[in-house]
Amino acid sequence: MKEAFSELTDLDWKFARTFIDLIRDPGKVLFGPPGQYTSAIKYASIVIGAAMFLILFFGGIFNETRMHILKWRTPLRLQHYQETQENVEESFGAVVLALSMLPGVFLLLCILFGKQNSWKTLLNIAFYFIAQFAIILTVSIFLTNFLVPVLEQYYVLEVTLFLYTGVFFLRGLGGKWYSTLPKSAVILLLGLLSYGLIGPFLNSLLTNLFNTTDTYHSPALSDRRIIQSRSGLPEEIGGVYIIEPAMENYFYIDENGNIGALGPNYSLLWNQDYEEIYAQSLLVIPEHNLLLVTGDSQQGDTTREVLLLYTTEGRLLTDYFFDEPMESSLFQLIRSDNDGFDILVPTKTAELEERYDYNKIAFQKSDDTWKLSIQQFITTPFPLGEIIKLPDSGYVSTTLMKSEWHWYNFGIARFDKDWNTRWHKVIYDKKNPYDPRRRPLYALDNSHDEILIQYAIANDTNVTNHLQSLDLNDGSIRWENAHTLPADYTEYWDMAVDKGSVYLVGESHYDIRRFFWKPSFHVAMVSRYSRADGSLKGLNTFGFEKADAHSRISYIEIDGDEIHLMGTESYIQYLFHEFRNNFSWTLNKGDL
């Protein structure tokens, strides 16, 4: 009993002495007599084992899964996986970082100090370093996240780790400071590169250990030879986000909220990069060769909606900043003639009301200058969404009722020329915990008095896509259909119709992998459905089965027997270099 107690207390004191001396004078530990300090492998094992114990048994004290709005728009199965992944990355971050850095640190130690020391000594040094690194990292993260959050603003964690690395190798391996400090910086850099290569696999391994599922999806990527022609879009576009065709040109908003225009051959006509503005929507007024841009303007700690009026050649004519919150993504063109044009302006509200008041902005040209005035316009019993003007001067609009956190319902309505409601059809209402991720898409076919509507809603396992055909005259349902694509999550970005088919484009997510070495990625998707009953007739996916690869089709248009697609694809090509391609593709309808 005495021997066991003696060994236990000896281990405790020896470990404490090792920890203290590794901070105070690392050289005494690295080159001290055998038995005086805890061995390198045992020290690292104790540190990592203790960290694992604390994480597994007390992790709930330190980690709380954050609830955010996307929870209600994400399938439950994917929610569980992402929560596990998030907790693994936060809880096991120090352990994963230390283990991932070990190969890189050891390799560079051998290169820089191999002549003076044996590989066994250098391996011990690497073990001591990564164990101590993990302790300091954990303490620093705890301090910045829980006790003194303001320290994070001053890069305390990064400075602490860099200084300790310099002290460890300078006092541990000796040498001139101007020689050892640069070497220690290189060791730290290569260790972090090693973490970048190995860390994702360890995180994936731990996530798979703590998260189990019965279903795994893998895409059957389409043969790219079916793409009849392909063109690269200008590199100045930071990812194709919104495309608005007009006057043989294409006006765009990219993923960074910047705007620009492409010519008929996809050449860049002009682009505008913003620093404090994020564009949300584009409205082209062809009668006056104007482009109206709405979005958010960051002014210090305040965000204000802004309206910008450009010529179609990219010259800014005027801007207007709103004092009240507006739904800038839903500004609508409701009149355009020789006298000027009017824009419908929705007011942002988090409260569900019985009536909604709308203003309009009237633009009039005087002395070659565009002037605007805001006027009271209409009151409706529901919030309006995307509006289409009918040949008889009436209107069709989606209706979007949304509280602060949830979509309450959405539908579609028809109005006469004075905005009196002819009929209103509720498409979705809040009967389950899930919300649509994106607003509904719809297309109008006046020749057949038909409205085609698409929306997608998450469920417990993935996402269900819904299609409906409504009668334009009375809003009655002609047919409806629903289907699910084999993916963890699917987003639908654009819609087009012809005489016999409905086409949808977007991206499908493959985030949950059966094996930890398999990457998570997104693929571009184009699907075709029958106009007769909404049944799925064809599906093509394009992408790269590489770690964190993203492919998306954002825009589709039909030209005879061909369809034209625009989108973006990217993946990490090597180290920190990203391959990104903004593309325009042409496919034959018969290949879908």
Image (cartoon, helix red, strand yellow):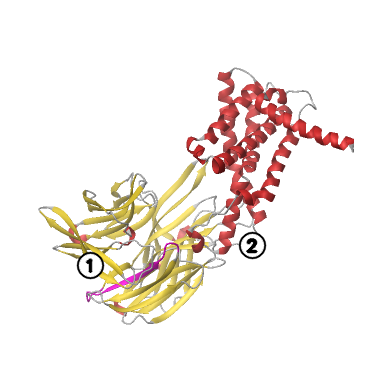
In the rendered view, tell whether residue 414 sits above or below residue 19: below
The mark found on residue 213 in the picture is 2
Label 1 close to label 2 by CB (< 8 Å): no
Magenta span: 390-405
The mark found on residue 174 in the picture is none
Crowd rating for badge 2 (residues with CA inside 10 Å; few <14, some 14–19, many 20+): some
**Which residue is found at the position 20% from the left and 57% from the top?**
289
Q: Give the amino acid at mark 1.
A: Phe
Element under label 2? loop
Quadrant where the N terminus is found in the figure: top right
Between the C-alphas of marks 1 and 2, the distance is: 53 Å
Asked if the magenta segment contains residue 404, the reply would be yes
Q: Quadrant of residue 283?
A: bottom left
**Which residue is found at the position 63% from the left and 40% from the top?**
100
Residue 466: percent from left, percent from top: 46, 72
Crowd rating for badge 1 (residues with CA inside 10 Å; few <14, some 14–19, many 20+): few
Quick one: label 1 or label 2, which is nearer the N terminus?
Answer: 2
User: In this orientation, does residue 381 appear?
Assistant: yes
Q: Quadrant of residue 361?
A: bottom left
Q: State the residue in front, 107 or 268.
A: 107
Task: Answer left or right for 379 relative to 180.
Answer: left
Q: Give the amino acid at mark 2.
A: Thr
Where is mark 1, residue-wise? 377
**Which residue is found at the position 48% from the left and 38% from the top?**
153
Residue 471: percent from left, percent from top: 35, 80
Quadrant where the C terminus is found in the figure: bottom left
Q: State the residue in front, 128 or 50.
A: 50
Q: State the residue in front, 412 or 15.
A: 15
Residue 546: percent from left, percent from top: 54, 51
Task: Answer left or right for 342 relative to 568.
Answer: left
In the rendered view, tell whether residue 475 sits above or below residue 116: below
